Amino acid sequence: MHLVQMHRIFVKEKKCLSEAELMELNAFVQLLPGASSSQTVTLIGYKQGGAVLATITLLIWVLPACVLMGGLSFFLQYIDSQNINIKFFRFIQPMAVGFFAYSAFQSFKIFIKHQATLFIMIGAMVVTFFIKSPWVFPSLIIIGGIISNFSDKRIPDLKETPKPIKWSNISMFVLIFIAAGVLSEYARINQWAMRRPINLFENFYRFGSLVFGGGGVLVPMMFEQYVTRAKTKYLSPQDFLTGTGMVQAFPGPIFSIASFIGGMVLREMGPGFQLLGCIIGSVAIFLPSLLLVLFFYPIWSILKKYVVVFRAMEGINAVVVGIMWGATFLLFLSVPFNWYNVIALLITFLILQFTRIPSPLIVLLFLLLGWLL
């Protein structure tokens, strides 16, 4: 939907760029981790006015969704404190699983083209389901990229000799990644009183740096980090799925879920820290996307000559689909198993598959059903 809107506004109406340029920008961001729609709109700003306009463009793009999702974390805490009946949320959790099942199904049709990618997908799905570690996801992505590079038949080699790439421009991205990791671990080991905000920044910066495949892969990473791991169970599966369901109703990128999760993680420290958590989540999740596109896009004409990149993407995409399926099963198991939850999941999937009803209207429908039934 984001790409369709960009095509209508920037190509047809404003004529800021051609259709071919928009498609190339979209193809380029698929090679990078991060929020692909946010990176695409950032690059549109970059082509019009350089790095400053690109940064402003990204801020305007993510602000509404981040404010709404951050506000949702306060709203849930308010209704908990007031003992308000929240039965209107009762179908949001299975509905959210239906959204992820649909995303996994669509991705399967797009990226799983032959037996090799099918095996990679199944392996990633099984590992995601059974192994609970934050390093599972980047490890699977690396392994998938390596496996798909063993074949030179599916993606033809390019004849041009690539020029050497100057990696100095990526130093800021790497420096923040390393510094955040070291400081977070040091704060954890020494039990700093302020370790939770520091850990939060490291978690989200790492997610934004390693997520290939958009929100469908980001959500299982967050679910594993903040729900399933025994020592860091900061919110319940029900609250988590409520957030992932409601983000479908709000405008903007799915990555804005980080604002909600950040607020929920720090809510026990008071309203001020809860607001800080929303800000940390918003900044840390989108900062890698901004740095990566601004550093890599100027050398895109060189980078795309490296056929190894394209071969790796085939395996990476298969891994992404496997992670999405594994996450869908994990999320389904976290929902109370009863007939009306199963029906809500199936109805969501069928609506998405066979109709053109917008996602916000689907969410409103299930909120209404929860209130009426």
Image (tube, rainbow, N blue to C red):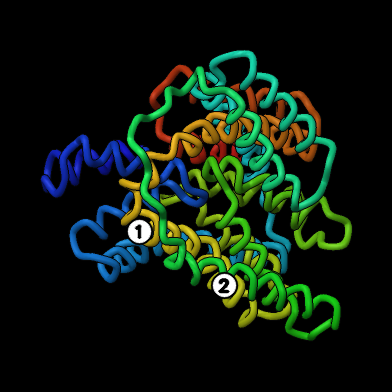
Where does residue 306 sit, x and y in percent of width and height? 43, 39
Q: Is residue 151 visible?
A: yes
**Circle 1 — which element?**
helix
Residue 46 image label: none
Query: Given contact means CB atoms under 8 Å apart, are the residues at marks 1 and 2 in contact?
Result: no
**Left or right of 276: which side holds 234?**
right
**Left or right of 127: which side holds 35?**
left
Where does residue 228 sit, x and y in percent of width and height? 81, 50
Residue 61 image label: 1
**Left or right of 26: which side holds 113?**
right
Q: Amino acid at mark 1?
A: Trp
Q: Quadrant of the N terminus?
A: top left
Where does residue 104 sit, x and y in percent of width and height? 59, 28
Where does residue 163 sit, x and y in percent of width and height? 36, 49
Quadrant of the rendered image containing residue 186: bottom right
Quadrant of the rendered image containing residue 294: bottom left
Q: Earlier in the sequence, mark 1 or mark 2?
A: 1
